[in-house]
Image (cartoon, coloured by chain):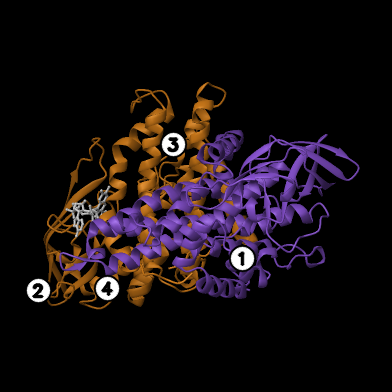
Chain colours: A orange, B purple
Amino acid sequence: MRFTPTELTEEELSLQQQVRDFLQEELPPGSHEPCLGMAANKDKAFSLKMAERGWVGMALPKEWGGSDRTAVDRFIVVEEMLRWGAPVGHHWVADRQTGNVILKFGTEEQRERFLPAICRGELGFSIGMSEPDSGSDLASVSTKAEQTTDGWIINGTKIWTSGAHENDWFVCLLRTSPMEDGNKHAGLSQLLIDLKSPGLEISPIPFLDGSHHFNEVTFNEVFVPDINVVGDLGMGWHQNTTEMAYERGGPDRWLSPFSTVEQLLREAKGTELEETVSDLFGELVARWWGIRNLSLSVARLIDTGEAPSIESSLVKEMGTRYEQEVVEKLVHLIDIEYSPDSDSLFERLLAQCVVTFPGNTIRGGTIEILRSVASKGLKGLPA
Amino acid sequence: MTEATGVDELVTETADRLFTQICDHESVQNAEAAGAAPEIWSAFAETGFPWISIDEDRGGSGGTLLDALEVLRLVGYHAAPIPAAETGVLGGWLLASSGHEIPAGPVTVLPNGNNITASVSGDQMTLAGTCTRVPWARIAERIAVLVEVDGQSMVASVNPKDCVIQPMTNMAGEPRDTVCFDGAIAPASPCVAGVNPESFRFRGALSRAALMAGAIEKMSQLTVTYTNDRIQFGRPVARFQAVQQHLVWGAQEAALARMAAETAGREANRGPAFFEIAAAKLITNQAAARATKACHQAHGAMGMTQEYPLHHYSRRLWSWRKEYGGDAEWSKWLGNAAVSQGAEGLYALVTGGSSVLS
Ligand SMILES: Cc1cc2nc3c(=O)[nH]c(=O)nc-3n(C[C@H](O)[C@H](O)[C@H](O)COP(=O)(O)OP(=O)(O)OC[C@H]3O[C@@H](n4cnc5c(N)ncnc54)[C@H](O)[C@@H]3O)c2cc1C
């Protein structure tokens, strides 16, 4: 394990500037309610605009509508969007992971059908992994796909499916052959499923603050054609593990409270509060600078063709805890009764952080599970 | 040279090999008892390592600041009980920047030299005052004293024999002596532009960040090894998730500290790097706190003994955390920098660092 320092090239810095100019133009500060990281609002019009500039699915090949850009380029775009609190929710999952999965494991026909539409910012995807009885122990999923003449019949339930009520498709991890004794990783496959399929029912699970974020998705004899099987039958576990590696270690795992912190500075400027928060800001910029450098070095490593799964698990575990620590420091230092309907944007954002950030160390694999993954990769290495 | 870091690989290899040979647990322990380690120093000096980054025509060994910081990282990694930072990137730098000769032996500096007063006549300086926490003063051949006289930064190359030295130590038993200058007279000359008490403070912080990054990494590795060897309940304790948490947290802090120190070094090698150095020192300070806690916990009682080497690193880290600025000093500096950027410039500071401050 080694995180090598890296820095942005001239071209990369110019991309960063383009993204900043775009955001300044589209979402000038004060003109929008910033979103908190990747739990961002879905705004298809915004996604389409980003796509016009080639910033959705940008690391996918040109041949499929992408821009053949690097993981670092994508890092830059995502980083700027998130710190700005931009509404990237519509294309988020497709851009981060589903596009990669279809490119890597999908058929020619699937690539043609989905990738250009993803890169145009049109298609919204959900993630169909968790089930009522399968959370951390994901390999125990039991939603069944049974073969018929030209496809599959699905029965079972997926749960916590973010955005299923607004998205178009999801990739589901399903059991395509019965669980064998002692090898629960076998017999799983990934299927692309249209969220509007007959027999598929989406019921909201109200989030703790009453908002509608995730859902229960039940399958009652849902038919999925053969052409929607991603990759090889029975290889679902391997593919799913690869998919999860795309979820980890990026700016979405450490930037979520940034717009809140920025807004605090905006509101404190010129008031007594400015002095109170000054030292805290020192600590925050230092740590963000440090974690960002680690996360950027992971992106650079990906561009050299490596799969830095240990490194990205370490960054995600640390980054999501840091997000919560930032909120705790704000709450500790700023002695006000902040409320979700305050006139102050900072107070509204802070209230939202407090209520929703416990989920940051759970979604996409809990920090406890990440520690098990990461610790297996730690060895007493030479200097 | 590795393209990514700009560090000469040969420096890493040679220094690591050297310290592996000469800085085993016992010799570091003996150095603490004796208050000095002449054999370790002379083996180190023979390689020319102490003077890396000082121009050869000034009596140094050449090489870049990055190479010098890599040596310091390895000094920290091996807990080498020698005034490496003081002789090279701090004292050597001060002497070379003011036209003084670089002596053959160790040099030290005054980390807290603000209360020293000086009067200059011609090229002689007369010093007064007492300075505490001077690293390795007792074995130094010269003390490079940086003072401001009428707004001009000057360096005096003081012979410690002209001072009264009271031996004191830090928590790791490393010499941090009290030096009384009263009446000492020494040759003095002005510094080149950019060398002044402020830049010296930052450079001191950078040297500690490098040492600390090395020590944290070593601690983390010791902890992985120990917990895989130690058996309880019939299996290595590293198999317990509660212990894995300590391992992961230790490794994260090691990675964060090293990234911060190396990135700050890269920027300092190019020019002023105030933001990066301040951030790196604050990060390594806090990483030291978190990592020592996790690594000690995972070691159980063994980590609390003198017999087992963990303390060489943890005690140095607790000491270095407070040298050249603790958490409060650097948070304050960084906080002022951040607040002065305003909300609109805040993220540009995180990504652009010193380049947006200048
Ligand atoms: C906001 C949010 C959005 C989500 N969106 C989606 C989505 O779109 N699609 C989707 O498929 N899923 C989604 N999830 C679900 C998420 O992936 C799971 O919550 C997560 O994998 C944990 O599973 P669980 O909630 O069942 O917890 P459990 O697995 O029941 O865990 C409960 C506790 O036990 C701990 N634990 C469990 N096993 C172990 C172990 N072996 N060792 C140590 N500790 C253990 C866990 O760390 C946790 O602290 C979302 C979750 C959240 C919070």
Q: Earlier in the sequence, mark 2 or mark 3?
A: 2
Location of the N terminus of chain B (image quadrant): bottom right
Residue carrying label 1: B41
The subunit letter for the residue under badge 4 reads: A
Q: Is residue A6 left or right of residue B115?
A: left
Tell me the kind of residue under disc 3. Answer: Thr
Residue carrying label 3: A260
Tell me the kind of residue under disc 2. Answer: Pro
Q: How packed is label 1: few (under 14 Cα within 10 Å), some, or many (20 or more)?
A: some
Residue carrying label 2: A178
Say which of marks 1 and 3 sits in front: 1
Do circles 4 and 2 both sit on a common chain? Answer: yes
Report whether residue A21 is seen: no
Mark 1 secondary-structure assignment: helix
Tell me the kind of residue under disc 1. Answer: Trp
Q: CA distance from mark 3 to mark 4?
A: 38 Å
